Image (cartoon, rainbow, N blue to C red):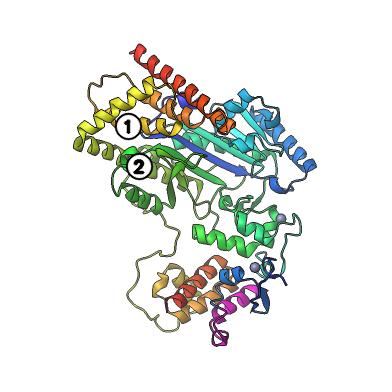
């Protein structure tokens, strides 16, 4: 028997998650928490991740999150998911579609964002050469592309039902620590629907880390 | 050689380096390329490079002197120069500017400038990248930017780093943590440099960018300037501070180190770097020093000892011999310095 995510042989512990057969390592990666501790866990702890992956899977886009689970090798260069995870390298451009989820997760873990802000091919970067010499005071603190963006607001509960668009905007700017679980969950679904996977994954991670706190 | 040119802040910063990686659309990345594709891609890059004024050399056609030269000047890895795969190199357009072909990515542009001057290093590299982008179809997506084999570089495909010597920070409790925090704020990292034998190079560090997404090229250049300015300032104040508190020890170490380097008949690389660190401590602080020494010599020696191809090449077999040759070269360099003064 082989793991349907990475293709590694599966030992004597069989872990099924969302209908997919996983090896221990993948189960850990996917944060399938301690799947061996009896069935009490089985019902609800998975629901958050499940919701998200369902939402992500149903969205149709070139970022095809569903692929990572079923397709083990890149159809073009035959690189396997395991290769990508162990080497941190892919074999061809098609790999970016095949292993989208893994790559995006890796990027977000390391860089906190996956938004491309660089120049377009064949153009030049717009570099302010004067700033090099002048010791200008640090007006703009360098944007730390991790989670917190604004000073946390004291209010914990959101005011009356904000519209969905409002909720997303608010959450993008807010310190995630101050947002309630329910709002996070809702925003996560919205973000996924809007194809803002960057935000969706951040919210998912925030929710996951809360689960860990308890 | 680019590293023999005068530079800014060379008491702390040995070099500024910019790497830009690009891949050609329609080909797999080098690790998964067929031989036919590899030849094909090489041909395209060779032609584009030729138009820019580069010379094309295949690594397996380089003699030892050429390899040594590329190893020394462009920090190519031993494995790249002696790879089973068909690797090649573009050089000859400008000192310190080269292009590795068929390493992890199709095209890796490297640009070195002596001392602290990331802007010119960046501009030289960007010009080459821009030309390649105009002459051939480059792997690029609007969402993720330039696509690379190594996932760490997807985005701008740009990485910026400085080679710095920080003996003052290293010997000051807590200073490295402070600098490291500063760097983190900009999403940069600082890490000690390890020789291929796993030994730490005394006082030598690399300060390196991490982000390739969420930042523009100009963000990265301006962050680079801020990070390195912080490092230089902190290192200088640590050196001065230690000198003030432990004058006798620093002066004693300075002269002892000089004497060892000046007269030793065989010496290991790790020891040389350690001794050079003490010279860095003393050079600006000791007034009316009894030896004639300048930053260019210290940096040239640091560079030569770090980039010793023959030492890597011999893989330990000729270690005793290379320790002797190393000592000879250092002795000559220091002697010349003294005679000139
Ligand atoms: Zn697995
Ligand atoms: Zn592929």
Q: Which residue is mark 2?
A: B231
Q: Quadrant of ligand 1?
A: bottom right
Q: Residue at x 71, y 56 (%)?
A: A79
Helix, strand or loop at label 2? It is helix
**From the viewer's perspective, is residue A49 above or below residue B78?**
below
Q: Is residue A76 left or right of residue B311?
A: right
Residue A37 position within the rendered picture, expressed as x and y whole percent measured from the top left: 54, 82
Residue B78 position within the rendered picture, expressed as x and y whole percent measured from the top left: 60, 35
Q: Chain of mark 1?
A: B
Q: Could you say which disc has been placed on residue B278 in the image?
A: 1
Q: Residue at x 44, y 64 (%)?
A: A147
Q: Is residue B156 left or right of residue B298?
A: right
Q: Residue furthest top?
A: B339
Q: Is residue A149 magenta?
A: no
Residue B37: quadrant of the picture: top right
Q: Could you say which disc has been placed on residue A176 in the image?
A: none
Helix, strand or loop at label 1? It is helix
Q: Mark 2 or mark 1, which is nearer to you? A: 1
Residue B93 position within the rendered picture, expressed as x and y whole percent measured from the top left: 60, 26
Q: Chain of mark 2?
A: B
Residue B254: quadrant of the picture: top left
Q: Which stretch is magenta?
A: A35-61
Q: Which class describes the residues within 10 Å of circle 2: few (<14), some (14-19), or many (20+)?
A: many
Label 2 – label 1 distance at C-alpha: 18 Å
Could you tell me which quadrant the C terminus of chain A lies in? bottom left
């Amino acid at each position: 028997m082989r793991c349907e995510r990475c293709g590694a042989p599966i030992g004597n512990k069989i872990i099924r998650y969302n209908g997919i057969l996983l090896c221990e390592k993948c189960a850990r990666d996917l944060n399938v928490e301690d799947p061996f501790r009896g069935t009490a866990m089985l019902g609800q702890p998975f629901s958050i991740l499940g919701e998200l992956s369902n939402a992500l899977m149903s969205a149709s886009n070139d970022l095809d999150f569903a692929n990572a689970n079923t397709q083990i090798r890149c159809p073009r260069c035959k690189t396997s998911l395991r290769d990508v995870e162990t080497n941190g390298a892919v074999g061809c451009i098609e790999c970016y579609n095949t292993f989208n989820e893994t790559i995006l997760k890796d990027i977000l873990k390391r860089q906190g964002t996956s938004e491309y802000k660089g120049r377009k091919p064949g153009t030049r970067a717009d570099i302010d050469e004067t700033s090099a010499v002048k010791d200008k005071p640090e007006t703009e603190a360098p944007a730390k592309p991790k989670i917190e963006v604004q000073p946390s607001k004291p209010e914990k509960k959101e005011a009356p039902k904000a519209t969905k668009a409002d909720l997303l905007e608010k959450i993008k700017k807010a310190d995630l620590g101050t947002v309630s679980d329910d709002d996070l969950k809702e925003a996560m679904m919205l973000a996924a629907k809007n194809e803002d996977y960057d935000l969706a994954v951040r919210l998912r991670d925030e929710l996951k880390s809360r689960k860990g706190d308890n | 050689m680019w590293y023999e040119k005068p530079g800014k802040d060379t008491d702390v910063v040995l070099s500024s380096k910019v790497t830009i990686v690009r891949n050609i659309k329609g080909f797999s990345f080098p690790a998964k390329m067929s031989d036919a594709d590899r030849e094909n891609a090489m041909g395209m890059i060779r032609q584009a490079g030729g138009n820019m004024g580069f010379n094309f050399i295949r690594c397996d056609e380089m003699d030892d002197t050429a390899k040594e030269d590329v190893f020394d000047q462009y920090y190519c890895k031993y494995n790249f120069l002696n790879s089973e795969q068909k690797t090649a190199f573009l050089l000859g357009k400008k000192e310190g500017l080269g292009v590795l072909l068929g390493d992890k990515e199709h095209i890796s542009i490297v640009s070195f400038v002596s001392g602290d001057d990331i802007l010119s290093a960046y501009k030289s590299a960007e010009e080459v990248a821009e030309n390649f982008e105009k002459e051939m179809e480059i792997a690029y997506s609007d969402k993720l930017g330039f696509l690379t084999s190594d996932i760490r570089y997807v985005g701008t495909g740009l990485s910026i780093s400085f080679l710095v010597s920080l003996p003052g920070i290293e010997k000051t409790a807590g200073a490295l943590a402070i600098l490291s925090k500063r760097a983190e704020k900009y999403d940069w990292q600082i890490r000690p440099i390890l020789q291929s034998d796993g030994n730490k190079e005394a006082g030598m560090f690399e300060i390196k960018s991490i982000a390739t997404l969420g930042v523009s090229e100009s963000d990265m250049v301006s962050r680079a300037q801020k990070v390195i300015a912080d490092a230089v300032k902190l290192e200088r104040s640590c050196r001065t501070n230690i000198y003030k508190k432990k004058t006798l020890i620093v002066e004693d170490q300075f002269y002892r180190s000089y004497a060892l380097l000046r007269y030793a008949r065989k010496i290991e690389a790790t020891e040389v770097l350690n001794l050079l660190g003490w010279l860095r401590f003393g050079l600006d602080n000791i007034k009316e020093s009894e030896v004639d020494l300048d930053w260019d010599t210290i940096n040239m020696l640091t560079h030569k000892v770090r980039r010793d191809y023959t030492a890597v090449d011999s893989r330990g077999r000729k270690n005793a011999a290379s320790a002797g040759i190393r000592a000879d070269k250092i002795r000559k360099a220091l002697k010349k310095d003294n005679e000139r003064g």
